[in-house]
Amino acid sequence: MNVPPLEPGCPWYELSSLALPNVKWCEAARCSWIVEPANTWSNLAFLVLALFLWRRSRGRDPRLAWFAPAAAFLGAASFIYHASYTFFFQFFDFMGMFVYLGIPLTINAERLGLLGPEARARALGWGVGLGCLLVLVLYRAGIPIQGIVLAATLTVIGSELRLMRTALRARDYRFFYLMVAVMALASTLSMLDVSRVLCDPDNHLLQGHASWHLL
């Protein structure tokens, strides 16, 4: 989709003009330090989530402790990306998503016997690095990089469905089914936003893509 540039003289104009993001969400870009207010401020939900996850993970499985810093990094990266309207910070937004999705992928790979505990961090690092490299390659090729996140999300779901058929299945799948439903709703709202089916560019309180962040 065509991504219009910022107006000359706007706070982020110089950095944005070097490389625009690969997508223009519905929300109208403002000539301000916060270019997309709704899409920017909605990322504070990730910081609230990070605090909840930090408190929840104390004294429990150490793998759960990874989620709090991952959520905080993702929220901060997505915040500055939508505030700046630049590909430079969009890159770090994708890095945050790869870390966030890479944690359950790594845990499930370990549960499936594909990884040992000593290889956890290394596998996560390689996965995030590969994802970041794909972002650069697909961006240069003009291919929507959002597809990488979709593929990673479906892999997380697929790995858990595989585990459900083994003795390694989890004890309770209520939150798994809730996660799938919430992700489906969030993805639908984001798609309706970018396709302009559900779009009010001048609404800087709530947008379809902002709803994706919140959900």
Image: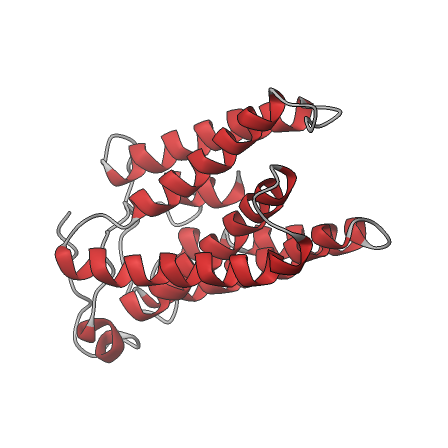
Q: Residue at x 66, y 57 (%)?
A: 66
Task: Give 73 or 164, whichever is nearer the viewer.
Answer: 164
Task: Name the outermost residue toward the top.
Answer: 165
Q: Residue at x 71, y 28 (%)?
A: 170
Q: Residue at x 39, y 57 (%)?
A: 94
Q: Is residue 192 above or below residue 142?
A: above
Q: Position of residue 65 (x, y in %)?
A: 72, 56
Whether residue 30 sits left or right of residue 60 in the image: it is left
Whether residue 2 sits left or right of residue 32 in the image: it is left
Q: Position of residue 198 (x, y in %)?
A: 30, 32
Whether residue 45 sits left or right of residue 20 in the image: it is right
Q: Residue at x 59, y 55 (%)?
A: 71
Task: Name the outermost residue toward the right.
Answer: 59
Determine if residue 75 is in view.
Answer: no
Task: Give 38 or 95, whichever is nearer the viewer.
Answer: 95
Determine if residue 35 is in view.
Answer: yes
Task: Give 51 or 84, whichever is nearer the viewer.
Answer: 51
Q: Is residue 14 above or below residue 27?
A: below
Q: Position of residue 89 (x, y in %)?
A: 36, 68
| Total marks in image | 0
- The quadrant where residue 162 appears: top right
Q: Position of residue 110 (x, y in %)?
A: 62, 44
Q: How is the protein colored in the picture?
A: secondary structure
